[in-house]
Amino acid sequence: MTGPTPATPADSMLVPDAVIRGAALALAVVVPAAVLQLLIDVPSVRWLLFAVILGGFGVGGHRAGGLASATPLTNAAAAALAAFVVAQGVAVALSVARGSAVQWAAIAFLALLATSSGMVGAMVSLRRGSSGRSGGRSDS
């Protein structure tokens, strides 16, 4: 009789709870901003909302990275990408239903931006955590 197989590094890289919580937080920011972006026809406001959307992926990455201490960047990227896939999946379905063309190259580029924003959020989390630990020491 053999025992359980040892965990491989790939088995322990993603923390599902961290990815889900990070993606949910990202969606809570991204979806309202994306809907507003569709409704508003002022270019400067649309750019501002695009920045809010990227920030939303960053916030989700920050949450996921903070919850997954062993592999924060991997989990942040996965959370941001998961949120992007959900939001963009709905947008693609709506485009197809309306008979609009789907710009696959733009979607791939935006997926990369979303994932990168999530990783930046995790890097902020790591930087804040390390600066808090290496800052002043308490003697009490």
Image (cartoon, grey):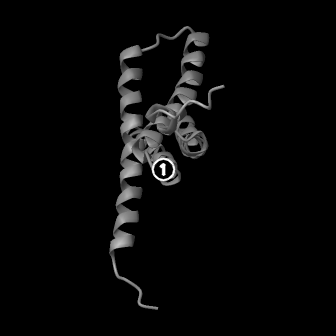
> Is 124 drawn above or below residue 103 in the view shown?
below
Image point (34%, 82%), residue name: 136
Q: What x and y, as percent, mark residue 11?
A: 51, 33
For this view, does 27 lie left or right of residue 139? right
Is residue 121 visible in the rendered image? The answer is: yes
> Is 65 drawn above or below residue 84 in the view shown?
below
Q: What x and y, as percent, mark residue 106?
A: 37, 21
Image point (47%, 41%), residue name: 75
Residue marked by disc 1: 59
Rendering quarter of residue 125: bottom left
Image point (41%, 50%), residue name: 122
Using the image as rendered, state which of residue 30 and residue 70 is in the foreground. Answer: 70
For this view, does 118 lie left or right of residue 89? left
Is residue 51 visible in the rendered image? The answer is: no
> Is 127 drawn above or below residue 119 in the view shown?
below
Q: Secondary structure at mark 1?
A: helix
